[in-house]
Image: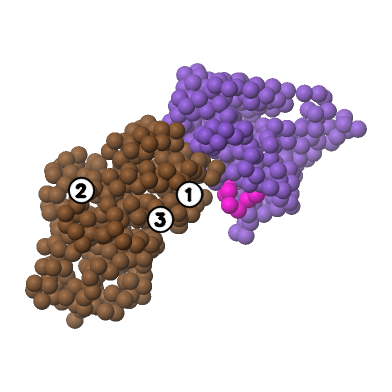
Amino acid sequence: MSNLVKIATRDAYGQALVELGKTNKNLIVLDADLSAATKTGMFKEAFPERFFNVGIAECNMMCIAAGLATSGHTVFASSFAMFAAGRAFEQVRNSIGYPHLNVKIGATHAGVSVGEDGASHQCCEDIALMRTIPGMVILNPADDVEARAAVFAAAKHEGPVYLRFGRLAVERINDENYEFEIGKAVTLKEGKDVTLIATGLMVGRTLEAAKLLENEGINAKVINMHTIKPLDKEAVLNAVKETGAIVTAEEHSVIGGLGSAVAEFATQEAPAPVLKVGVEDVFGRSGPGADLLDLFGLNAENIVDKAKKAIDLKG
Amino acid sequence: MDIEERRNLQIMACKVRLGILEAVYNAKSGHPGGSLSVADIITYLYFNQMKVDPENPKWEERDRLVLSKGHVAPALYSVLAHKGFFEVELLKSLRKVDSILQGHPSMHLTPGVDMSTGSLGQGLSVAAGMALAAKLKGASYKTYAILGDGEIQEGQIWEAAMFAGAKGLDSLIAVLDNNDLQIDGSLEEVNSPYPIAEKFVAFGWHLIEIDAHDFDQIDSAFKAAANNTDKPTLILAKSVKGKGVSFMEDNYKWHGTAPNAEQYEQAVAEVRDVLSSLEVENE
């Protein structure tokens, strides 16, 4: 584990597209006038003939991607999470999800860590929206290594995939031997008192929380749930069996995201307290991304508090 | 087009109309008005213009058709059935729970359907994506998109029109079924999209205006569109909603209502009359 490298997952996304484009000649990348921010601009530089800017028209972009996919292309369509999952939801649902087309939605600038742009651009609803679409795979990588691996896995997967990337540079958690499999959660630390299940940028903060808990004599298991859908049910089941209590952590609304997915499954198959760390049904605001994460309780301290409550609730 | 060719198309269009009526009547729901207004054009496309193979519906080189106004699925299904993509008998199963014929087109359930549609405003973008793919591959296939005139109230149509014009997608041919009526009434009453022709021209499209029920005009329009090499083409087809059934013609109430038994019999009798006289002429 190395704490020396700090890279935003969106940068890894852009680099991975370029790498993938070298071997996959069928790959096409679309953007809606945000290529500098989403980092698809890197692909545009490398393969201008396979990059198309549709302008500020995300709904149009999703359906163009669908049309390209019907003709055998693997298409990555990129915008900010707010516009990819929010504005174009119905296009993704009807023209990509329903016909189960091979479109990969590269959604960057997810969550409150977008920072200064404020609430209008801080999408904390995208996982909830995408989860409701049958057959949609949702990947939310924790660092640059995982982001690269997720892009490669998405390209290999037949069918629609929603990839969620962040703007903020995050510490690298995984090493170069990291192996990624869609739908297979990664146990980062074993433990017996409580399981902390995190996704995306919150994985790093959850590891911090586990250390703080350790100092207080609480032994927490830590799982990186990079795939929200399909959820690794076995991992949740084992977590309940081994520890009897769960805390989820995500940079997303507590409504409809990882916490909901875990709780929905647990209540039916493995009842146990499931406490959620996430954005508590409020809109974001302007400020430095790191400060906002603290402001909304998306930090190690809150995870520690919830972990203690979850242990109390075990009864 | 010679007389015989035209008559054969007219005969097929009658059979297609009978299929539409049978499907909607048996389903007890569906959209007869718009299906009948676009029936001649879709008949022409599949029987006279498009490269398709009913034995190999996913043939890569085939021409594509995106029924952006997906609610007129009965027209597409009836044409596909008569073309041999599936049994004509299946038309009766429209909208039934075990049918391959969904209320709106599904590309995975119905052979010959190139894209799942139904939510208005999305099909022109999809067709633009297909045309872009043809351009990238250097493939020769054409992509047809069938739009409703009410449908162009959706903003995404204009996003797609802008993209196709700006990128010079010359293999994209859109047909606008201009029957002047939408669910709630006339276009003018609801929210006028006119002038339509000037808008598409301003977005960088070729424009051809025709009578949607005149096969000579339809034929020359599609032949001209196929030869365009710099821009996408819009065929603005002035049509009559409910065409071919007297009491359905030009009446918005038949947008999404199925005929009862008596109305069905009358409708079928009217179309059969036309069909018989065409067949007599043919002998």
In the visual, does A313 lie left or right of A144?
left
In the figure, the shade used to draw chain B is purple
Separation of residues labelled 1 and 2 (CA atoms):
29 Å
Image position, residue B68 (x, y; %) = 54, 38
Disc 3: CA contacts within 10 A as few (<14), some (14-19) or many (>=20): some
Most foreground residue, A173 or B60: A173
Q: Which residue is mark 1?
A: A102
User: Residue A169 — which label?
Assistant: 2
Disc 2: CA contacts within 10 A as few (<14), some (14-19) or many (>=20): some
Residue type at mark 1 is Asn
Q: Secondary structure at mark 2?
A: strand
Disc 1: CA contacts within 10 A as few (<14), some (14-19) or many (>=20): many
Separation of residues labelled 3 and 1 (CA atoms):
13 Å
Region rendered in magenta: B104-111
Most foreground residue, B144 or A105: A105
State the brown chain.
A
